[in-house]
């Protein structure tokens, strides 16, 4: 029951969905599947009920049984998907002796409307996230068009908690569905089982480049058919030498991800030569745990003692569908040194699992990369005597894991892809609906949005031959091609952008930075620390004039707005509405004279909470009809769909750089953003803590913050022909900021 059946409906919504629901709707997709409904009942007991969920357009209904098998059954809950819906990925949780992946649904403006569902796998959770996102986009589109037809007869939004209202029949007319996951028997499986009939996804395309960091990778060895690369650059990005192995595996990213995280020793014995016996010591949250492992010396005769190890695992899924797993050696009080075992430290390593474009093959392919760090002295010794010494080392065993995964799936082809259980085939129009339902996101971009100084022109992550980019078009598989092709595409002239966004008949004012003071000082040079500066936009790739035609991107130009100050605050509770504070520079005499100020408040969850507040000033008034003008005075729905940030860590520990990446992020889609428009300013409060994935990454960044130099670019995403080429709204460089330098907000 895992077939992908494209469903489109031209008829009216089911009974009880409200009058006029079918008019002007076009062809709607219907998603359905078994999930767990999690919650707490009226007497305080936690429950976990198996439920069948149906999402049709922006309507959702929950059943006790499959309405296909039981026609006429009434739903136990139903509601409308609002444009204020937020879906938070809470990660893995132990339920009924098995691991499930939990999603939290809530209305960002009404905390009483919320609830949790759980899926059997990370892949099913991803598909439900995409389905809800499509429903949310439909609600946003209806709202922007002034269409109020998206209401049930009860005029209620979806609420999975609290009293269960009496609802009317909703199952009428359900025919072909996009099935997510399998039947209830699969939801009750043990966490160690790997799902069969994994559904191929057409909703995203993974990146094939490997140019997140400024490293020069050289292939030094082939290990069981996989290439092994060494970082031969002179940059000091870590504590030792970086090695990586890259392989193509005939399986989808979700199945590989679940297998890598699986603790079932019988399964791991088939592909993992090192960490066969594992157990969870501590589960920090749904994206972070601590694992204890042992190794039996009988399996490797050159290890003369029993060895054990403790390491942490931190994982998350990017907007492009790729998975990243960070593994670090740790010390944990629940697992002290064990008698008879030698405690060793597993090398810091990262798994990266990305989808490869395999449209010509019925089997989905994934690119799996494992990067690990080893000591320089040990590597020099092993490099001189590779076969004799390195082959018996722990790093070698780790690098062999990619080859083990590849052979495991070759030996178990049923785990990769099976034909659908039904023969329903989508029409061409239906297929188009499935493919283009998520065009607002960045998931189709084939290169990174922040340029890295990679000196290698080899695409080490692809088996295809490399071809130089064609003239007039930059569609890159490796960021190094961007550096080689800067002459082909240049950013638009600053003058033309300013004329399009600013009132041309108003003379610009001169912004004197000495009139504005923030708690974080402006850097005096590259060696200065705990400071900020404003770099140019040449380190970022943005949408070019022909982006809608050929997806080409260009090098960013100078920012449109000027960064005038940066505040670094701390407080026990989250900090909001900074611009209204009487001591804020926005309220100062100099601030009131500026035509416009954009305030970006990045709320960082920690103990205490921190806020990084960026102030950008405009030298002239903003045109009301321009893209920026529509963003400033537009609806929150429009702002959420356009507010974009691009990160780029210039200096820092290599694991942090890989975790943060350089992909653009629509912040309004990823986290909760609140907007305050008054007088001559717009403040955007970005609640990073509203996303468990963002919290997890930010926790990692805070651990290395004093050694990190990071660039950020703020943009209003261009989506229409007349909005292109894109421009950078503002930039900031944060140089080794100290946590203890934050000042109390009062």
Image (cartoon, rainbow, N blue to C red):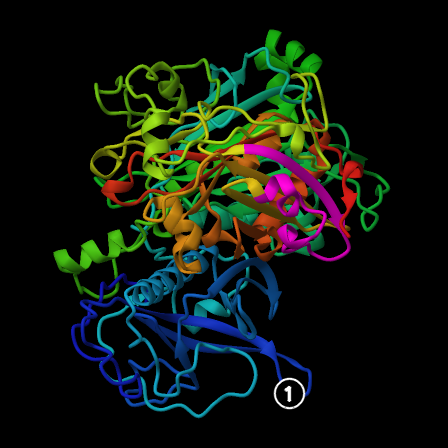
Looking at the image, is 656 positioned above or below residue 671?
A: above
Residue 185 at x, y percent in the picture: 44, 71
**Residue 610: image x %, image y %?**
71, 47
Please, which residue is most extreme toward the right here?
A: 339
Q: Which residue is mark 1?
A: 42
Element class at badge 1? loop
Q: Nearer the viewer, residue 621 or 463?
A: 621
Q: Tell me, yes or no, whether the highlighted magenta stretch contains residue 133.
A: no
User: Which quadrant would the N terminus be assigned to in this image?
Assistant: bottom left
Residue 543 image-quadrant placement: top left
Q: Residue at x 69, y 33 (%)?
A: 705
Q: Is residue 706 above or below residue 469?
A: below
Residue 111, quarter of picture = bottom right
x 54%, y 16%: residue: 231
Q: Residue furthest left?
A: 428
Please give left or right for residue 164 compared with residue 550 in the image. right
Q: How many numbered marks are there? A: 1
Q: Return the x and y of residue 681 as percentages of the image width and height.
A: 53, 49
Mark 1 surroundings: few (<14), some (14-19) or many (≥20) residues within 10 A: few
Q: Is residue 566 magenta?
A: yes
**Position of 573 compared to 442: left or right?**
right
Residues shaded magenta: 563-592
Q: Answer left or right for 662 relative to 719.
A: right
């Amino acid at each position: 029951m895992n077939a992908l059946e494209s469903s489109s409906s031209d008829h009216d919504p089911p009974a009880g969905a409200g009058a006029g629901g079918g008019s002007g709707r076009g062809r709607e997709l219907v998603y359905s599947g078994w999930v767990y409904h999690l919650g707490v009942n009226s007497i305080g007991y936690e429950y976990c009920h198996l439920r069948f969920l149906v999402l049709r357009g922006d309507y959702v209904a929950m059943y006790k049984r499959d309405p296909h098998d039981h026609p006429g059954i009434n739903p136990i809950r139903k509601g409308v998907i609002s444009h204020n819906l937020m879906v938070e990925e809470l990660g893995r949780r132990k339920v009924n002796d098995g691991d499930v992946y939990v999603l939290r649904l809530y209305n960002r403006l009404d905390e009483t409307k919320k609830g949790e569902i759980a899926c059997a796998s990370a892949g099913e959770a991803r598909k439900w996230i995409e389905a809800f996102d499509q429903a949310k986009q439909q609600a946003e589109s209806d709202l922007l068009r002034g269409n109020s037809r998206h209401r049930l007869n009860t005029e209620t939004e979806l609420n999975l908690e609290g009293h269960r209202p009496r609802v009317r029949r909703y199952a009428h007319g359900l025919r072909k569905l996009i099935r997510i996951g399998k039947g209830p028997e699969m939801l009750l499986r043990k966490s160690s089982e790997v799902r069969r009939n994994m559904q191929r996804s057409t909703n995203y395309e993974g990146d094939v480049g490997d140019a997140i960091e400024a490293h020069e990778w050289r292939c030094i060895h082939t290990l069981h058919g996989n290439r092994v690369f060494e970082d031969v650059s002179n940059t000091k990005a870590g504590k030792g030498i970086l090695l990586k192995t890259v392989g193509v595996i005939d399986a989808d990213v979700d199945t590989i991800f679940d297998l890598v995280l699986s603790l079932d020793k019988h399964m791991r014995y088939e592909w993992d030569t090192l960490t066969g016996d594992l157990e969870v010591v501590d589960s920090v949250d749904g994206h972070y745990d601590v694992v204890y492992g042992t190794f039996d010396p009988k399996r490797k005769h050159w290890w003369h003692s029993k060895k054990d190890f403790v390491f942490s695992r931190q994982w998350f899924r990017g907007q492009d569908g790729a998975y990243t797993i960070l593994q670090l050696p740790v010390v944990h009080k629940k697992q002290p040194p064990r008698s008879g075992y030698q405690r060793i430290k597993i090398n810091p390593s990262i798994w990266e699992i990305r989808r490869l474009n395999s449209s010509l093959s019925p089997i989905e392919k994934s690119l799996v990369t494992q990067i690990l760090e080893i000591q320089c002295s040990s590597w020099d010794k092993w490099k001189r005597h590779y076969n004799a010494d390195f082959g018996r080392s722990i790093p070698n065993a780790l690098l062999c894991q990619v080859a083990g995964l590849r052979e495991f799936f070759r030996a178990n082809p049923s785990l990769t892809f099976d034909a659908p259980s039904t023969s329903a085939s989508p029409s061409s129009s239906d297929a188009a609906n499935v493919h283009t339902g998520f065009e607002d996101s960045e998931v189709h971009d084939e290169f990174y949005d922040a340029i890295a100084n990679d000196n290698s022109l080899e695409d080490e992550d692809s088996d295809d031959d490399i071809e130089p980019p064609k003239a007039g078009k930059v569609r890159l598989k490796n960021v190094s091609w961007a550096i080689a092709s800067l002459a082909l595409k240049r950013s638009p002239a600053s003058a033309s952008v300013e004329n399009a966004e600013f009132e041309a008949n108003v003379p610009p004012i001169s912004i004197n930075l000495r009139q504005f003071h923030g708690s974080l000082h402006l850097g005096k040079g590259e060696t200065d620390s705990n400071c900020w500066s404003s770099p140019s936009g040449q380190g970022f790739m943005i949408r070019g004039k022909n982006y809608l035609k050929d997806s080409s991107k260009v090098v960013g130009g100078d920012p449109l707005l000027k960064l005038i100050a940066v505040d670094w605050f701390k407080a026990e509770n989250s900090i909001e509405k900074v611009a209204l504070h009487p001591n804020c520079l926005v309220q100062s005499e100099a601030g009131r004279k500026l035509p416009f100020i954009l305030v970006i408040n990045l709320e960082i969850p920690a103990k205490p909470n921190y806020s990084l507040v960026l102030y950008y000033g405009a030298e002239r008034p903003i045109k009301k009809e321009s893209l920026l003008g529509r963003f400033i005075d537009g609806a929150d729905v429009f702002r959420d769909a356009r507010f974009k940030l691009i990160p780029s860590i210039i200096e820092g520990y290599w694991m942090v750089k890989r975790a943060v990446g350089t992909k653009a992020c629509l912040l309004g889609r990823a986290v909760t953003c609140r907007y305050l428009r008054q007088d001559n300013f717009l403040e955007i409060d970005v609640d990073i803590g509203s996303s468990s994935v963002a919290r997890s990454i930010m926790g990692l960044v805070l651990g290395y913050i004093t050694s990190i130099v990071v660039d950020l670019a703020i943009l209003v995403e261009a989506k229409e022909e007349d909005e292109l080429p894109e421009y950078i709204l503002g930039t900031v460089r944060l140089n080794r900021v100290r946590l203890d330098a934050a000042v109390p907000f009062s």
